Image: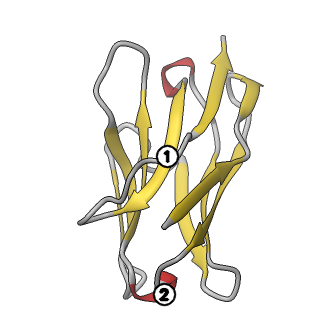
Amino acid sequence: VQLQASGGGLVQAGGSLRLSCLVFGTDFSRTAWAWYRQRPGRQRESVAVLLTDFNTDYADSVMGRFTIYRDNTKNTLYLQMNNLKPEDTAVYYCNSRYDPWPWGQGTQVTVSS
């Protein structure tokens, strides 16, 4: 399985970014997915989950600002991030929600104050 995350960058506080994750090598539509992030000096954490029935769950810290969604025709997972805060600065990864595969490189998001 290959997980190619992209879309990160440098943005000012209050700005928006949309992350994409192109998935190869698995049945994308039958997998529960999640976006994770690893902030400097912290462990990797889940920020958004999308189940196969399209139910979602979010970490309290991003609730109301981030939206996870998928396009099964493109084998792509997305994370729309609005009203970004400096504390959102992290490397963002996509992976299976329940049985993570080897982690890809992720995509760096840097939010300046």
The secondary structure type at the circle numbered 1 is: strand
Residue 90, position in %: x, y? 51, 27
Q: Please give left or right for residue 98 compared with residue 68 in the image.
A: left
**66 or 110, which lies in front?**
110
On residue 29, which mark appears?
A: 2
Q: Earlier in the sequence, mark 2 or mark 1?
A: 2
Q: Amino acid at mark 1?
A: Tyr
Do the residues bearing badges 2 and 1 touch, measured as CB atoms within 8 Å?
no
Residue 58, position in %: x, y? 36, 54
- Specify few, some or many for label 1: CA neighbours under 10 Å numbering under 14, 14-19, or 20 or more: many
Which residue does the image show at 75% across and 24% down from the upper left?
10
- Specify few, some or many for label 2: CA neighbours under 10 Å numbering under 14, 14-19, or 20 or more: some
Can you say whether 94 is above or below 83 in the image?
Answer: below
Can you say whether 66 is above or below 49 in the image?
Answer: above
Which residue does the image show at 60% across and 85% down from the upper left?
72
Q: Please give left or right for residue 94 compared with residue 20 in the image.
A: left
Name the image quarter holding the C terminus. top right
Task: Identify the residue under disc 1.
Answer: 93
